[in-house]
Image: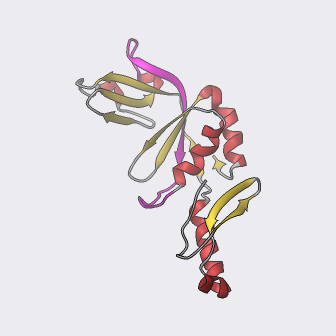
Amino acid sequence: MTTAVLGTNSVAEPVSMLPGRQTKRTAWPKAARQNSNVTARAVFFFQEKMINHVKLRVLNGSYAVSRLSGDEPIPAWADGDGFVSISRNGDELSIVSLQERVPTGVKADLDWVCLKFLGPFAFGETGVVLSVIKPLSENGLGIFVVSTFDGDCLLLKLADYDAAVTLLIAAGHSIQ
């Protein structure tokens, strides 16, 4: 449940913003309630910031999430066509790439579908990723999210793809 603080000396009240959903917001301060123009602008701002309708594009190919030891160099096979993400922490080197490039013997989780968020989105813009992953998570679908400078990519298991599309469209998102 999301709470937005809209002023001091306010009381909390539930507000329904979408059919079947209830969001808790803090009631308007008395001065704002008396000026309907201020209230209308604030409600519009609240709804626009909290409810994101994201366009997603399905990228071609099947993807793999591979794991190598944290001290290994980045392998040549990692880079190439399609979406690629290479991340290293002290313990592991993770590579997301088209699965056809992953050599036999490399530890990898196969059969992921990649959906690109069509942005760009500002660094300070909140709720974008949450609005997409929430309906999936609430329905038990596993995800893998990778962020880039201009946007995000969502990876879903191929076996969950049809259910995910249904849930995302029902949540107000579009898929190309």
Residue range highlighted in magenta: 102-126
* Front in this rendered view, residue 38 or 129: 38
Residue 17 found in image quarter: bottom right
Q: Is residue 8 left or right of residue 162?
A: left
Instruction: Name the residue: 52% across, 76% down.
Output: 8
Instruction: Name the residue: 62% across, 83% down.
Output: 30
In the rendered image, the vertical position of residue 81 relative to residue 6, given as above or below = above
Farthest residue, direction top: 105
* Residue 148 spot, x, y in % from top left: 40, 47
Instruction: Name the residue: 65% across, 85% down.
Output: 37
- Count of residue discs: 0
Q: Is residue 38 magenta?
A: no
Color encoding of the figure: secondary structure
Farthest residue, direction right: 19
* Residue 22 spot, x, y in % from top left: 70, 57
In the rendered image, the vertical position of residue 146 relative to residue 38, given as above or below = above
Instruction: Name the residue: 69% across, 42% down.
Output: 167
Q: Is residue 22 left or right of residue 141?
A: right
* Front in this rendered view, residue 85 or 22: 22
Is there any visible trace of residue 139 in the rendered image? Answer: yes
* Residue 113 spot, x, y in % from top left: 56, 32
Q: Is residue 111 magenta?
A: yes
* Front in this rendered view, residue 98 or 121: 121
Residue 90 found in image quarter: top left
* Front in this rendered view, residue 21 or 125: 21
Is there any visible trace of residue 118 in the rendered image? Answer: no
* Residue 105 spot, x, y in % from top left: 38, 11
